[in-house]
């Protein structure tokens, strides 16, 4: 019995150090620009889905931001990338600790580089990041949505309408009942560390990045200023049901 426990303990430790060494090696070898560093958290035993896709989506739509929005994209992505490289080696090897470090860094970079101001002037463009099906499994997209909910009444109302409309498309009347009985007032505002208002069990397929977005991955945040609106396809319009 003791031997079995020791074997399990060594196996667990081996697994922890294996995923940690894999991510650490990827972070060190990744460049300082582009989305490659965020891809280090995909396809391992502590997979954190969403970071890479958020980066690709921001770069893919960079041409639709004004100069202030471009600065947010460039600075926020650099903040995240450098923060991940600097902090990962100091964090516990437990997967839960790694995830909390990532989520905390997200909130810090979004706040430092004023995501709420970028959202105010670019709601249509930011709408590409507010997608109901990307909230499953919970991860970086949930943190992103929770932060957007702290950006004021207009932002909360906008996020709520988009998510309820998309939820209704997937699950029908179930989501409509949420809207009629659980309106989100200022006193009910979701805090950054809690689960978003439309949480439910189950997972839907995560949207895959387009080829155009993958091409933008190679361009990197430092080349955002050269992006033009004509270089990116229009964002997909989503049918929204009024809350």
Image: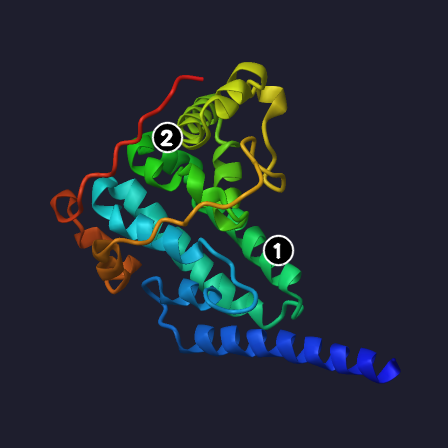
Is 207 situated left or right of 142 in this image? left
* Dot placed on the residue nearer the N-terminal end, 2 or 1: 1
Point out residue 31 in the picture as x, y percentages from the top left corner: 35, 72
215 relative position to 128: left or right: left
Q: In this view, does 127 lie above or below 102?
A: above
Q: Which residue, as the protein is rendered here, is positioned at the far top?
A: 180
Residue bearing mark 2: 120
One can see residue 39 in this view: yes
Camera-side residue of 201 and 87? 201
Q: Is mark 1 on a helix, strand or loop?
A: helix
- Mark 1: few/some/many CA within 10 Å (<14, 14-19, 20+): some
Identify which residue is drawn at 64% across, 74% down.
16
- Residue 100's disc is 1
39 sits to left or right of 225: right
Q: Residue at x 65, y 70 (%)?
A: 93
Q: Is mark 2 on a helix, strand or loop?
A: helix
């Amino acid at each position: 019995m003791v031997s079995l426990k020791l074997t399990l303990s060594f196996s667990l430790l081996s697994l922890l150090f294996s995923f940690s060494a894999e991510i650490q090696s990827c972070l060190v070898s990744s460049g300082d620009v582009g989305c490659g560093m965020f891809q280090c958290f995909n396809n391992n035993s502590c997979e954190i889905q969403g970071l890479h896709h958020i980066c690709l989506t921001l770069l893919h739509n960079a041409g639709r931001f004004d100069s202030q929005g471009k600065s947010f994209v460039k600075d926020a992505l650099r903040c995240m990338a450098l923060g991940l490289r600097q902090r990962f080696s100091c964090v516990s090897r437990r997967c839960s600790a790694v995830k909390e470090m990532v989520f905390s860094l997200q909130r810090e970079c979004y706040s430092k580089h004023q995501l709420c101001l970028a959202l105010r002037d670019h709601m249509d463009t930011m709408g590409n990041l507010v997608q109901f099906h990307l909230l499953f499994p919970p991860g970086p997209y949930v943190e992103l949505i929770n932060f957007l909910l702290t950006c004021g009444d207009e932002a909360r109302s906008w996020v709520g309408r988009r998510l309820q409309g998309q939820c209704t498309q997937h699950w029908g009347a179930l989501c409509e009942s949420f809207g009629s009985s659980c309106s989100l007032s200022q006193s009910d505002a979701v805090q950054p560390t809690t689960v978003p208002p439309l949480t439910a069990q189950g997972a839907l397929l995560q949207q895959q990045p387009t080829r155009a977005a993958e091409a933008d991955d190679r361009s990197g945040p430092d080349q955002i200023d050269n992006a033009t609106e004509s270089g990116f396809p229009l964002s997909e319009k989503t049918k929204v049901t009024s809350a």
